[in-house]
Image (cartoon, rainbow, N blue to C red):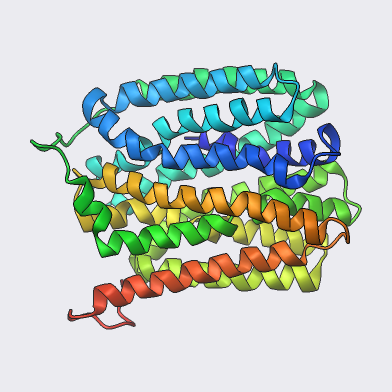
Amino acid sequence: MMCTIGIANSFGVFSTYYINFLYPNVSAGNIAWVSTTMTFFMLIGSITTGPLTDKFGFRSVSLTGAVICSLALLLASFTNALWQVVLTQGIMFGIGAACIFSPSSSLPSQWHDKTRPLATAITVAGSGAGGMLFTAITQKLLDAIDYKWALRVLALILLCISGTASLFYKRRVSVPKGGVNFMAIARDKRLIMVGLAGFFVNVGLFMLWYYLPTAALALGQTKQASNNLILYMNAGSTVGRIIAAYAAMALGPINLVISSYLVCSILILVVMLAVKSMVAYIVLAVIFGAISASYISITPPLLTEFFGTQAVATAMGIMNAWCSIGILIGNPSQGAIYQKFDRPTGSFMAITIWGSLSLFLAASTYVLLKYLIVCGSAYRIWSKL
């Protein structure tokens, strides 16, 4: 996950490069399709990775994903037009990442019980660590060699590390006879609420990842300093995903997610619209990175609690499909909003409101999930859930 989702999380460096240097005459909305298709296919593809994992095993599926991701970056290095970048660095990389993301995030639930939240948090923290590491590596490569060779080096690193890690995957819980009841899980009201929250999160989550460096450039900061904001977000994300496991045990997983996204929603509005300074951007990057990824750490153990260890991979796949729709709507929309309302005036008001509102709606949906669980039970709305 460090070398696949982590590389995807560092795309903000490429996004800044594409918008401001490689394709300066292309709209930000069109460039956003690279990251949109990458994340969309990574998440929507998770629906198929459950059955594939049941049939071929965790090891084979994740290893295949590592090979596809590496090949996608290699092919992207030979592109000469944006649509080719979308096909390779976007769609193809996303398909490969789908073979790694869902199995990797659900496998620890089969090997841990009491420490399941922490084990899952450490696993998904790999994507944050990778984003931090590969943000720095990508920036150094872009400065030292052109972006095509940067992609080739990243492809080799991914294949060596992520491919090797896949060889150690092993199932612990056998697949039940007759398989998992896909439709029963998909129709479960609790999963619908979790999926809807994931949809809202992904509609606006990546606004800061892709536009905060551009906002820093507008302040007169250097390209290096601007891209360092992505590194700070990934650093916060790495630590935050592990801390989220302990916080979930203390506050309750649903309570944690609600409070995290309410804080994120308010913080984005205050910093992006009122403060507008590099120091504030750094603080925002660290805090946002630390708490905005809480649902990634919390969702796998939460779904395991709802549906059991045998069905968690399928449940994760369905939830990720909800998230993929949010990505498909969110990234192009915020790119178009920035292009129409913000870019001509040098403002970031429209996309800031977009990102803040989406996270507020995500928090509200988790409130509805909690009400759904509390209704008819001994719990109360203020209970530790």
Residue at 73% across, 65% down: 350
Q: Please identify the residue farthest to the left as the structure is shown.
A: 177
Picture coordinates of residue 205, whole percent (x, y)? 58, 56
Residue 247, quarter of the rendered image: bottom left
The foreground one among 28 and 254 is 28
In the image, is residue 164 above or below residue 302? above
In the image, is residue 347 above or below residue 29? below
Residue 191, quarter of the rendered image: bottom left
Left or right? Give the position of 72 relative to 220.
left
Picture coordinates of residue 321, whole percent (x, y)? 40, 47
In the image, is residue 23 above or below residue 125? above
Residue 3 appears in the rendering: no
Residue at 44% across, 57% down: 198
Residue at 76% across, 29% down: 140
Picture coordinates of residue 69, whole percent (x, y)? 52, 24
Left or right? Give the position of 380 relative to 266.
left
The foreground one among 376 and 354 is 354
Left or right? Give the position of 56 relative to 64.
left
Residue at 78% across, 44% down: 27
Quadrant of the image for the C terminus?
bottom left
